[in-house]
Image: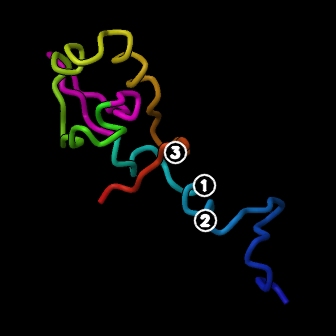
């Protein structure tokens, strides 16, 4: 009778709609975008900016660090870069990259 209960996975109870989000990583998210600086390029989460989260502006393929600082400031840039970790489980704002 293994696998008869689709809600029970291992030792945790996982609801069907949450299962895909629990497996998703930050790098698969629509808001994960490379930020191009003078010397290096890093991934950042644009979900920290309301402009992209609400859909007022389209999420770009890449964004220059100067433009990000112009929109939100340095503190938000540091916050957005620190939010992304390679292989980290996605946050509650996860939206699949289409």
Q: Quadrant of residue 67?
A: top left
Name which residue lies at 54% across and 41% down: 91
Contact? badges 2 and 1 (CB < 8 Å): no
Question: Position of 40 compared to 53: left or right?
Answer: left
Residue 11 visible, this angle: yes
Q: Quadrant of residue 13?
A: bottom right
Name which residue lies at 42% across and 52% down: 95
Q: Which residue is mark 2?
A: 17
Q: Is residue 67 magenta?
A: no
Q: Which residue is mark 1?
A: 22
Image spot of residue 27 (x, y percent) = 39, 46
In the depicted structure, whether residue 14 falls above or below residue 70: below
Q: Which residue is mark 3?
A: 90
Dot 2 or dot 1, earlier in sequence: 2
Contact? badges 3 and 1 (CB < 8 Å): no
Image spot of residue 56 (x, y percent) = 25, 38
10 Å neighbourhood of mark 2: few (<14), some, or many (≥20)?
A: few
Name which residue lies at 55% across and 45% down: 89
Residue 39 visible, this angle: no
Mark 1: which secondary structure?
helix
Q: Is residue 40 magenta?
A: yes
In the depicted structure, whether residue 97 falls above or below residue 82: below
**Residue nearest the observer in this picture, 26 or 94:** 94
Q: Quadrant of residue 37?
A: top left
Image spot of residue 3 (x, y percent) = 76, 83
Camera-nearest label, 2 or 1: 2
Q: CA distance from mark 3 to mark 2?
A: 15 Å
Mark 3: which secondary structure?
loop
Magenta-colored span:
32-50
**Residue nearest the observer in this picture, 23 or 67:** 67
Mark 2: which secondary structure?
helix
């Amino acid at each position: 009778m293994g696998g008869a209960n689709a809600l029970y996975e291992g030792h945790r109870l996982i609801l069907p709609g949450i299962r895909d989000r629990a497996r998703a990583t930050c790098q698969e998210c629509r808001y994960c975008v490379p930020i191009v600086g003078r010397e290096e390029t890093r991934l950042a989460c644009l979900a920290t900016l309301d402009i992209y989260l609400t859909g007022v502006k389209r999420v770009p393929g890449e964004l220059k660090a100067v433009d990000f600082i112009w929109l939100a400031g340095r503190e938000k840039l540091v916050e957005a870069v620190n939010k992304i970790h390679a292989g980290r489980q996605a946050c509650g704002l996860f939206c699949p990259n289409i």
